[in-house]
Image (cartoon, helix red, strand yellow):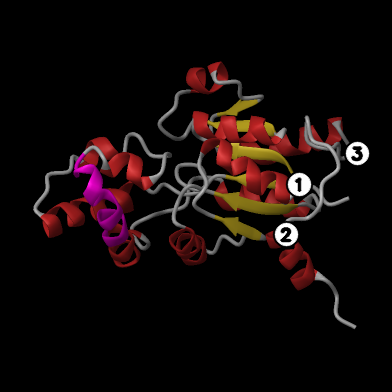
Amino acid sequence: MTFTVGFDLDMTLIDSRPGIRACYLALAERTGTYIDADLAVTRLGPPLADELINWFPREEVPAMADLYREMYPSIAIAATPAMDGAREAMAAVRAAGGRTIVVTAKYEPNARLHLSHLGIEPDVVVGDLWAEQKAQALREYGAGVYVGDHVGDIRGARTAGALSVAVATGPCSADELRAAGADVVLDGLSAFPAWLTGHREAAPREAAPRGAGPREAGPREAAYREAEAPRA
């Protein structure tokens, strides 16, 4: 049985701080509204609207989010590097016979642009999900492990019954990640391939995610399976 590992995007697979900072500065210039971009990039993880509400009236947030997302590709994509070990972590899953899924709160089209620009090729990308909402995609694709940098990622993994592997490369410290209930805390993705090897050796037979019973493929997974199925 193919095993699936999920990954968060911002501050897990990519260091999105330079690009997001530049985009917030451009948004501030475009709208004439002060945004402390240096502060904003210290609390990445939650949805965009959760940050914009600090700088714009509530009724303006949807329009500002649309404007930010429109500006984002030309400003943020090229400015954003991969995190150390990101490509190697994804390759380790593939080498072990697994598949990879990126589940992120980021606007999905922009998430795909980041991954394409950096040559990171997960099997599935699902955007616009935060914290416990991430369990929807993790369950649908049968992810037994979810890797992320934020306490919200831990909540998503636990809600899905997946093993929570946290990396201390984002806004949450290793102690905060442990206190939030992470099953494993790594310094970064560079340590992930060795951890995965040990994890697979300790549990050679893929177990069902904790707390999960039999499930049916959701519509996105069904489409993925159809695309991957061999043709006659």
| Helix, strand or loop under label 2 | helix
The residue carrying pointer 3 sits among few (fewer than 14), some (14 to 19) or many (20 or more) residues within 10 Å by Cα, namely few
Residue located 41% across and 47% down the image: 15
Range of residues picked out in magenta:
55-67
The type of residue carrying mark 3 is: Arg
The type of residue carrying mark 2 is: Glu
Which label belongs to residue 221?
2
Q: Position of residue 104 (x, y in %)?
A: 52, 48
Looking at the image, is 81 positioned above or below residue 170?
Answer: below
Which one is in front in this view, the residue at disc 3 or the one at disc 1? 1
Q: Is residue 62 magenta?
A: yes
Which label belongs to residue 142?
1
Q: Position of residue 4 (x, y in %)?
A: 74, 48
Q: Are marks 1 and 2 in contact (CB under 8 Å)?
A: yes
Q: Which circle's residue, 3 or 1, is located before the other in the chain? A: 1
Which one is in front in this view, the residue at disc 2 or the one at disc 3? 2
Mark 3 highlights which residue? 205
Looking at the image, is 37 positioned above or below residue 28?
Answer: above
Q: Which circle's residue, 1 or 2, is located before the other in the chain? A: 1
Q: Is residue 24 left or right of residue 117?
A: left
Q: Position of residue 37 (x, y in %)?
A: 22, 43
Q: Quadrant of residue 11?
A: top left
The residue carrying pointer 2 sits among few (fewer than 14), some (14 to 19) or many (20 or more) residues within 10 Å by Cα, namely some
Question: Extreme front residue here?
Answer: 59
In whole angstroms, how far apart are the C-alphas of marks 3 and 1?
15 Å
Q: Is residue 191 left or right of residue 222?
A: left
The type of residue carrying mark 1 is: Gly
Residue located 50% across and 41% down the image: 130
| Helix, strand or loop under label 3 | loop
